[in-house]
């Protein structure tokens, strides 16, 4: 009896031990599998816990190249109020970089304890990040990684490290420094202006990708005996001239284009149209582009539809709207000119049209077939011009014509979730950097509602009728309750 009981206890104990061992083994195998095939999901609204799409694109390009990259981050000064936040933010960024790339090696160094490492790299400040790729390196200072925002009790420290490291990757991977010239002297948008109609924000966005936007003034070009587009120009931007460009300067742009250059034209409904566009088979009909699908509550902001093109591919996949304002129609020749390949980039929906005045209802234009142009209406077109056109003598030139200059300005650049990406990707395409095309920055917290004209009409009547109706109902209820007493 005692022997049988001991056997049963031994069998039960053995089974429990075996089950425990198998359970531990299953957990270990599961952990190994998860560690080998890690998947991260960020459910936050701004995707703040994962790398930006633009950073991931640059990491994939470096992985493809295979050249090792070392990112060394140094700790903040101990005892300082913000040192924990700074160290935590840098550690999290290094973890994400290490996870996302096969060629990036990350190191987090205690500045106080490992002074020899700091001295070897020539680092003399806390919270410094050094990015190295071969012999090239970029040093990122504390002031570039962190920024104080807000006032009073709401003042806080914001981490800008990923943007700074992203810029460093651009500087280390770019074959050469890209210079884009913006034509001035005819009332064009000013790259140095911080006003709503200026381009200072666009300059900052381009600078993050190692593009430099400079002014080009043919009249005041003192460093050249004969005016011309500088040899280091990767592209030239002509952004909404207010007066016609003189024929001599258009010839200089044409000569640049003939040598394989790239040019961006941005026009508005009332701005003069460069005659060079006509030679490329592009016309700008009178009127402005409208659509039943609008960015609420603006009657002159149609919601663009993306066509199949590298500039808008990622924007279309992520459903990021590019906001335009009072856009001019841009119409390529049909059939296209010989040697010119035209691709539509932005257009309206089938309910869009070219408005030329006429009846207006509740502040919004209405489509009138007798005077308006039938849609869909094109708002941006990309051209690839070959030697068969007779205009280009070397290689293939690229031209982008956008029927809205506001999309590049400080006032509108932050209005649409896709505007910054559209602007930067436009220049990337122009200079042939298609591999770097991606979505720029993180999804914005600001949300814009897109409504059709019928939707806004319903909202208006609800606002007008629902409020008074509720007051009447509440009044009737109060009157009935008092009468019952």
Image: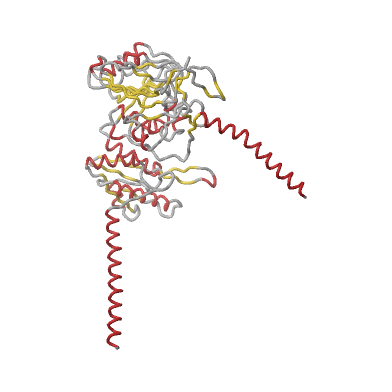
Viewer-nearest residue: 343 or 399: 343
At 23% from the left edge and 44% from the top edge, which residue is drawn?
68
List the single residue furthest toward the bottom.
1
Viewer-nearest residue: 484 or 88: 484
Q: Is residue 424 left or right of residue 415?
A: left
Q: Position of residue 134 (x, y in %)?
A: 23, 42
Q: Position of residue 26 (x, y in %)?
A: 28, 63
Quadrant housing residue 246? top left
At 33% from the left edge and 48% from the top edge, which residue is drawn?
96
How many numbered discs sit on the rendered protein?
0
Quadrant housing residue 284? top left
Q: Where 50 falls versus 211 (above or below)?
A: below
Viewer-nearest residue: 21 or 407: 21
Q: Position of residue 53 (x, y in %)?
A: 35, 40
List the single residue furthest toward the top.
247
Quadrant housing residue 264? top left
Q: Where 316 falls versus 394 (above or below)?
A: below
Position of the N terminus, as image quadrant, is bottom left
At 35% from the left edge and 48% from the top edge, which residue is drawn?
93
Q: Where 12 falls versus 23 (above or below)?
A: below
Q: Position of residue 355 (x, y in %)?
A: 47, 19
Colouring scheme, one of rainbow, by chain, secondary structure, one colour: secondary structure
């Amino acid at each position: 009896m005692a022997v049988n009981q001991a056997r049963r206890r031994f069998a039960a104990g053995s089974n429990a031990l075996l089950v425990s061992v198998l359970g531990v083994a299953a957990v270990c195998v599961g952990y190994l599998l998860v560690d080998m095939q890690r998947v991260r999901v960020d459910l936050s609204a701004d995707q703040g816990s994962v790398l930006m799409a633009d950073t991931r694109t640059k990491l994939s390009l470096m992985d493809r190249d295979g050249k090792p990259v070392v990112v060394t981050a140094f700790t903040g000064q101990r005892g300082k109020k913000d040192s924990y936040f700074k160290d935590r933010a840098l550690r999290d960024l290094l973890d994400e970089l290490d996870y996302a790339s096969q060629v990036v090696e990350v190191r987090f160094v205690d500045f106080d304890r490992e002074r020899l490492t700091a001295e070897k790299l020539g680092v003399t400040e806390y919270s410094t990040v050094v990015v190295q790729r071969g012999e090239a390196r970029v040093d990122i200072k504390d002031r570039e990684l962190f920024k104080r925002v807000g006032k009073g009790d709401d003042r806080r420290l914001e981490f800008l490290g990923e943007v700074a490291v992203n810029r460093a990757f651009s500087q280390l991977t770019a074959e050469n420094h890209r210079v884009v010239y913006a034509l001035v002297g005819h009332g064009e948008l000013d790259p140095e202006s911080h006003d709503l109609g200026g381009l200072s924000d666009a300059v900052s966005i381009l600078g993050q990708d190692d593009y430099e936007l400079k002014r080009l003034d043919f009249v005041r070009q003192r460093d050249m005996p004969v005016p011309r587009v500088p040899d280091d120009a990767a592209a030239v931007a002509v952004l909404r001239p207010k007066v016609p460009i003189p024929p001599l300067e258009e010839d200089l742009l044409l000569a640049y284009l003939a040598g394989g250059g790239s040019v961006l034209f941005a026009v508005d409904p009332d701005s003069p149209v460069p005659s060079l566009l006509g030679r490329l088979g592009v016309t700008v009909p009178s009127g402005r582009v409208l659509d039943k699908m609008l960015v609420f509550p603006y009657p002159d902001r149609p919601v663009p539809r993306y066509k199949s093109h590298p500039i808008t591919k990622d924007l279309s996949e992520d459903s990021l709207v590019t906001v335009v304002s009072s856009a001019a129609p841009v119409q390529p020749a049909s059939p296209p000119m010989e040697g010119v390949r035209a691709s539509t980039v932005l257009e309206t929906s089938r309910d869009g049209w070219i408005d030329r005045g006429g009846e207006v209802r509740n502040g919004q234009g209405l489509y009138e077939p007798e005077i308006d142009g039938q849609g869909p209406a094109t708002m941006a077109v990309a051209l690839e011009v070959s030697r068969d056109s007779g205009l280009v003598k070397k290689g293939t030139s690229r031209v982008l014509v956008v029927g809205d200059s506001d999309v590049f300005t400080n006032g509108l650049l932050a209005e649409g979730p896709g505007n910054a990406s559209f602007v930067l990707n436009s220049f990337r395409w122009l200079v042939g950097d298609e591999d770097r095309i991606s979505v720029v920055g993180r999804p914005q917290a600001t949300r814009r509602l897109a409504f059709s004209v019928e939707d806004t009409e319903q909202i208006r009547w609800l606002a007008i009728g629902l409020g008074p109706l509720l007051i009447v109902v509440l009044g009737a209820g109060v009157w009935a309750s008092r009468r019952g007493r």
